[in-house]
Amino acid sequence: MFISSSSFFLSDYLTKILNAGDFSVAQFDFALKSKNITALTIAEKNAVLGSAHWLTLNRALAKTQWQSALKLAYWYQQSAKEVANHEKGLLITSAIMWFEQAIRLDSQTAIIELAQLYYRHDNFIKAQATLEELPEELPEELPEELPEELAEELANNNLAESALLLRFNMAIDLGDISLVKALLNSNVFTLTSKAKTDSLLADIDKYSVIDDKGVFTNNTLENSSSCITSLQLFATNFKHLKHIEYLIKRFKTEQPLAQYICLPTPRYISLKGLDCIAKSQEAISCDESNWQSIAKKVDSQYIGLMLKEGGANVHMGILYFDAKDNVEVFSHEVSHLLGFVDEYPLSKTHDKCRDSQTKIFSHNIAVLKKYYQGTRKSVRVNILKNIPWAASIKNSTPILKLEVIGEEKEEYWRLGTPIAFQQQIGVHISETCQKANDDNGFKSDLVKHSFSAFKPVSRRTQLRYFASDFPKEYLTLLETKPKAYLMPSFHYNIALSLFQQGLTIEAKYWLKQAAKWEEAPLKKLTILKGQFNY
């Protein structure tokens, strides 16, 4: 068969016969080589999703067809989820390029999808700028022949609703509560499907996004017989709040410490109310004077904050952690609020590792001199007075070993339970102050200055490695003296921050609030004087 390529109406003719299905193989191949849209579309429908042929056909179609540009954007976006982190960048860049092409071809769906992509990557400026490209009135728009896993997702996707929900999430993430209120009163919100608005309103109410309810009532604490303290957790967006709920659920079912601390529903806090430094390799730190704005509405002794990134840590009455931390990390940090100290090496400058302790300060760590002189019995008695778990050490478990040290051959008792008794509760070396003791030697003139951290058990615990178990022996210590070594309430953090800013009068007010949480008279006085040493 001969086809005149000079025919002015050839393209229209090919399109007509292709649409009618009345064409030969030769005609179809010719139409395909001529980049006829209908031929390309037919071929694309029969191509394997994601194959080189499928990609080539859609790239050709995407020059004029927004549906194909959108398909490519989705494909690259989905592919980015399935590769290693270092490979994601190029795929995301390709997805953005094809979303932008679809937008140039007047796709409103692409505008919303690209804005959501920017939002998921925390690029709020570009997300907002992209949304600004939407017209005031949005048509219903659904691209044809989407990949199967995406078709259902968009089948009921009203563009106006999607844009509205995205604006809500961004406003909440950015802490713009005035915008949240404005959106709630908008015409689009009243016309949005009830299922979506009910879910949004439920979350806004549940997490106290619009803070007009007064004090957050801690019903969990009131209804619990085993809690010895309480922790109110905060986050700056719904995603993190829901992740906190997931961690709390796992914490309660998997971690033994859960029975000792009450965890009410997590609450939203506006990002605008925070001033934090949160980098992936550094401990999270914040200007804690900012917590004044919510302190009068929280009836928990401690508060916690989840951010996107940053090292988990406890600073007196405030727990900081990030969205990547698991339940073991969370349990480890909670243990600090309850009076347990790290068993991994702390910094040389840490307060607890500058010298041997002057008083007992935790359930599981005692920082004591390594060497003693005197009778074994008298030395043992005096040492046990400074060890919080002394009552759990059997009389038959040794804690001292005689050593001869230095040129003068002096005899000293070296503190530590021998390896032969490592399964017993004793006085076992902890790595806690290892860095501070790097320079400690065994010369006689250094003996009196040599100290170390000691712990009740020889094995590694959750205080050393997050994934390790929390020892039953430590739970017994906690139950014996449940409030003896608790951190001061978070009000003390506020007081310290204000004092460091020179606001002494204001700081004294918050010291009084912190003291209200204390039962022991001596500790209450220590808090009132601002002399707590953590």
Image: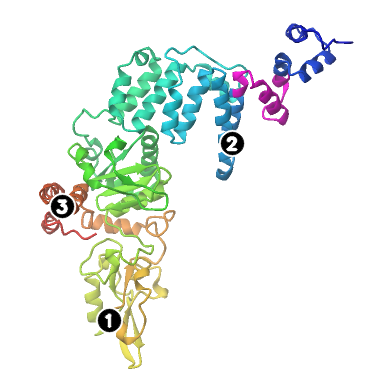
Residue pointed to by mark 1:
448
Q: Amino acid at mark 2?
A: Leu
Q: Position of residue 227 (x, y in %)?
A: 25, 45
Instruction: Name the outermost residue toward the right.
Output: 1
Q: Could you tell me how far apart the alpha carbons at marks 3 and 1 are, in whole angstroms?
A: 40 Å
Residue 265 visible in the displayed image: no
Give the mark nearest the N terminus, 2 or 1: 2
Residue 480 visible in the displayed image: yes
Quarter holding residue 10: top right
Question: Is 508 in front, or is 422?
Answer: 508
In the rendered view, tell whether residue 223 sits above or below residue 374: above
Q: Position of residue 460 (x, y in %)?
A: 42, 62
Q: For the residue labelled by badge 2, is the local secondary structure a helix, a strand or a loop?
A: helix
Residue pointed to by mark 2:
91
Q: Could you tell me how far apart the alpha carbons at marks 3 and 2 are, in whole angstroms?
A: 52 Å
Q: Identify the disc placed on residue 502.
A: 3
What type of secondary structure mainly makes up the magenta span? helix
In the rendered view, tell whether residue 358 sits above or below residue 3: below
Q: For the residue labelled by badge 1, is the local secondary structure a helix, a strand or a loop?
A: loop
Q: Is residue 87 left or right of residue 288?
A: right
User: Can you say which quadrant of the picture contains the N terminus?
Assistant: top right
Question: Is 316 in front, or is 457?
Answer: 316
Instruction: Name the outermost residue toward the bottom.
Output: 408
Q: Could you tell me how far apart the alpha carbons at marks 2 and 1 are, in whole angstroms?
A: 63 Å
Q: Which residues are magenta?
A: 43-69
Q: Nearer the viewer, mark 3 or mark 1?
A: 3
Give the mark nearest the N terminus, 3 or 1: 1
Question: Is 1 in front, or is 365?
Answer: 1
Q: For the residue labelled by badge 3, is the local secondary structure a helix, a strand or a loop?
A: loop
Give the mark nearest the N terminus, 3 or 2: 2
Q: Position of residue 283 (x, y in %)?
A: 36, 52
